[in-house]
Amino acid sequence: MSRLSDPSDPDRRIQGPEPEGVGALLGLISGRRGWQARLRGARVHQHWDEIAGDQLARHVEPVRLAGGVLVLRAVSSAWATQVGFLAPELLARANAVLGAGEVTKVTVTTGRLTSK
C-alpha cells in the first residue's frame, strides 16, 4: 500500500483551502438567497417577550421587520398609544437582540392578534 493511499499515514494531507465552519457557510448561503431579513424577523418573534416585556407582549405582537421598520399590531388603540410612548425603548431592546441599527423605526397598527 502506498503512503498516498494509506488513510492512517499522518503525512498524507489533502491540499486545498482551510475548511470553513458550518455557521459561516449558512451565513453565506442565507445572504445569497435573501434569507437574512426573514431570519431577523423570526428572531424578533422568538425574542418578543424579552423585547416587549410580559405585559406589552400580551397585547401587542410583531408583524414584520422590513427595511429596518418593525411593524407591530396592538389589540386596541389604547395599546397602540402605549407602543408610541415606548417606541424608543422597544427600538433599543430590539437592536440589543438583533444587533445595532437593525431596527430604525417602530410603527403600530391595531387589530386582532394572531399569535395569542
Image (spheres, helix red, strand yellow):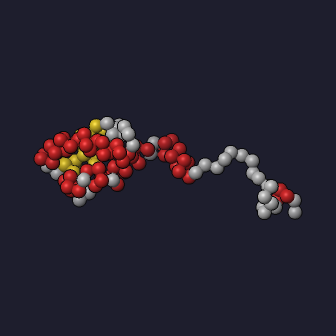
Task: Residue 1: give x, y in percent of width and height.
Answer: 87, 63
Left or right of residue 10: residue 104: left
- Figure label count: 0
Report if residue 4 is visible in the image.
Answer: yes
Task: Residue 97: give x, y in percent of width and height.
Answer: 36, 48
Q: Residue furthest right?
A: 1
Quarter that holds the C terminus: bottom left
Report if residue 66 is visible in the image.
Answer: no
Task: Residue 13: give x, y in percent of width and height.
Answer: 77, 53
Residue at 75% over, 47% down: 15
Q: Residue furthest left?
A: 78
Residue at 23% over, 56% down: 54
The residue nearer to you, when weighing 32 against 86, is: 86
Decide: is 25 above or below 105: below
Task: Residue 25: give x, y in percent of width and height.
Answer: 55, 48
Residue at 15% over, 48% down: 79
The residue nearer to you, when weighing 63 against 15, is: 15
Left or right of residue 24: residue 1: right
Residue at 38% over, 45% down: 98
Say which quarter of the image contains residue 84. Answer: top left
